[in-house]
Image (cartoon, rainbow, N blue to C red):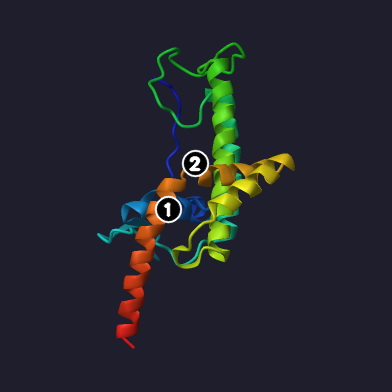
């Protein structure tokens, strides 16, 4: 058992500062609770209230506060770096069985060097995955209206050019599209049917 003193958040102003000013509550909602149909709010009396919906899409916010998101990322990254250096991990996935408490002993490895190296590589994958998602979202917003077909032959040619020009991120993004070509085409067929049905419904309400 790790012996440590846990301080209580003993006043509502401190709770408000942590949850709202540091961006913790919006990010908790956006990344964890909203997809589950849940939303945690701090009301005017600074009491926590949990909202819920049975809607299949969960809770979708109209806007994302980019400033609070940046504040949260700065706060999180600092905390994660300190925890990684001290504990050897950020998200705990198993019981702590090697030592009964943490120390600052340089020879103490709660995670082996091999695991730390793997952690770094996986962090790289997470980072590039986020960047690829941004590219796909931006391309979708600009080009892919109404579930339009994708010219996979052109995607392949562009991918070869990207790799030749060392544009690895764009090349990897196109490689993913090509790898999942069959699944994407099947999904686009479904999307077109939904779009057709929506158009008929919309025209019928005019």
Q: Secondary structure at mark 2?
A: helix
Nearer-N-terminus badge (1/2): 2
Residue 202 or residue 160, whichever sits in front: 160
Query: Which residue is at 51% across, 27% downward?
Result: 89
- When the figure is inspected, residue 155 is found, relative to residue 179, above or below; the finding is below
Q: Describe residue 185's horizontal placement relative to residue 165 as left or right.
A: left
Quadrant in which the N terminus appears: top left
Badge 1: few (under 14), some or many (20 or more) residues near its Cα, within 10 Å? some
Give the x, y percent position of residue 86. Answer: 56, 24
Residue 79 in sight: yes
- When the figure is inspected, residue 100 is found, relative to residue 68, above or below; the finding is above
Name the disc covering residue 73, or none.
none
Query: Which residue is at 59% across, 31% downward?
Result: 82
Which residue is the site of mark 1?
A: 185
Badge 2: few (under 14), some or many (20 or more) residues near its Cα, within 10 Å? few
Give the x, y percent position of residue 73. Answer: 58, 47
What's the CA distance linking mark 1 and mark 2?
Answer: 12 Å
Q: Secondary structure at mark 1?
A: helix
Residue 88 or residue 7, whichever sits in front: 88
Name the disc covering residue 179, or none.
2
Quadrant in which the C terminus appears: bottom left
Residue 138 or residue 96, whichever sits in front: 138
Query: Which residue is at 33% across, 59% downward?
Result: 57
Give the x, y percent position of residue 66. Answer: 57, 59
Query: Which residue is at 50% across, 67% downward?
Result: 145
């Amino acid at each position: 058992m790790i012996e440590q003193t846990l301080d209580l958040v003993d006043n509502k102003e401190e709770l408000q500062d942590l949850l709202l000013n540091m961006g913790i509550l919006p990010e908790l909602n956006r990344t964890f609770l909203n997809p589950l149909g849940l939303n945690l709010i701090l009301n005017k009396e600074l009491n926590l209230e949990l909202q819920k919906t049975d809607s299949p899409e969960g809770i979708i916010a109209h806007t994302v506060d980019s400033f609070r998101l940046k504040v949260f990322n700065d706060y999180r990254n600092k905390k994660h770096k300190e925890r990684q250096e001290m504990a050897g991990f950020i998200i705990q996935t198993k019981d702590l069985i090697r030592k009964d408490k943490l120390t600052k002993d340089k020879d103490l490895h709660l995670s082996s060097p091999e695991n730390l190296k793997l952690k770094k590589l996986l962090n790289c994958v997470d980072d590039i995955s986020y960047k690829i998602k941004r590219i796909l979202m931006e391309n979708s917003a600009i080009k892919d209206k109404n579930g339009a077909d994708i010219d996979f032959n052109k995607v392949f040619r562009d991918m070869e050019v990207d790799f030749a020009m060392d544009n690895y991120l764009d090349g990897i993004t196109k490689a993913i599209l090509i790898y999942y070509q069959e699944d994407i085409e099947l999904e686009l067929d479904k999307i077109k049917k939904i779009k057709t049905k929506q158009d008929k419904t919309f025209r019928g309400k005019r």
